[in-house]
Image (tube, rainbow, N blue to C red):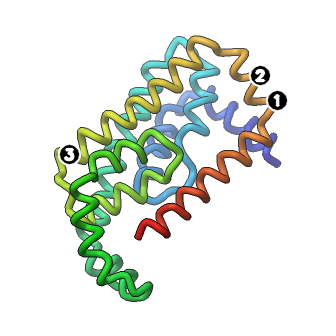
Amino acid sequence: MLRRLYDWTIDLAAHPHALWALALIAFIESSIFPIPPDVILIPMVLAARDKAWKIAAVCTVASVIGGLAGYGIGHFLFEEIGRPMLAFYHYEAKFGAFQETYNEWGAWAVFIAGVTPFPYKVITILSGTTGLDLPVFMVSSIAARGLRFFLVAALLWKFGTPIRAFIEKRLGLLFILFCLLLVGGFVVLKYAL
């Protein structure tokens, strides 16, 4: 099944509307969707290495705009969704102290989540919830997402086929590592609050 999904993604990467699909996935991943845009970014760059920078730019812009949507979810829906969740888990008392600490170090949290496999959507929503300064959030998001996607594109542009062979040969292992990192991100978040 994993091989079929990978092959489907490679085929999608060569589709005439692939950039739109990438933009949509990058946008929604930054606020609600669990699968990162790398699953389309990587095969797209491998399929069209001459367009690596354009692909990375589309992914970055869409991801940052999606991050802004996540920020909006946290900011505007906190009373309706966030506060009841805090009450349910008995975190109301801890939230005030966490909010103060988070806003002091929020730029780094956004940057780290934007570059690493940690779920970026969690940080975008949390940034809106805590009221992290919007320009700080935007600068950190642009720097982090740009670094991540342009670095991936640069490596694929430079090494192309050998990287693709590496990915295809170790697809199962890479998928397991990705899942472990994703779950690990949620575990870290759980114990950070």
Give the CA separation, mark 3 to mark 2.
39 Å
- The tag on residue 91 is none
Q: Which mark is residue 169?
A: 1
Q: Residue at x 56, y 14 (%)?
A: 157
The Cα atoms of the two marked residues, 2 and 1, are separated by: 6 Å
Q: Which comes sooner in the sequence, label 3 or label 2?
A: 3
Residue 22: image location, x then y, percent:
50, 38
- Looking at the image, tell me whether mark 1 or mark 3 is earlier in sequence order: 3
Q: Which residue is mark 3?
A: 136
Which amino acid type corresponds to the residue marked 2 in the rendered image?
Ala
Foreground residue, 131 or 5? 131
**Left or right for 156, reference 149:** right
In percent of the image, x 48 and y 69: which residue is there? Answer: 191
Instruction: Please determine whether, in this image, residue 185 is positioned above or below residue 115.
Output: below
Assess whether mark 2 and mark 3 are in contact (beta carbons under 8 angstroms).
Answer: no
Confirm or deny contact between disc 2 and disc 1 (CB under 8 A). yes
Secondary structure of residue under mark 1: helix
Position in image of residue 185 (x %, y %): 53, 56
For this rendering, which residue is in front, 24 or 169?
A: 169
| Residue 118 image offset from top left, x and y in percent | 50, 50
- Label 1, residues with CA under 10 Å away: few <14, some 14-19, many ≥20: few
* Above/below status of 176 relative to 151: below
- Say left or right for 103 vs 10: left
Residue matched to label 2: 165
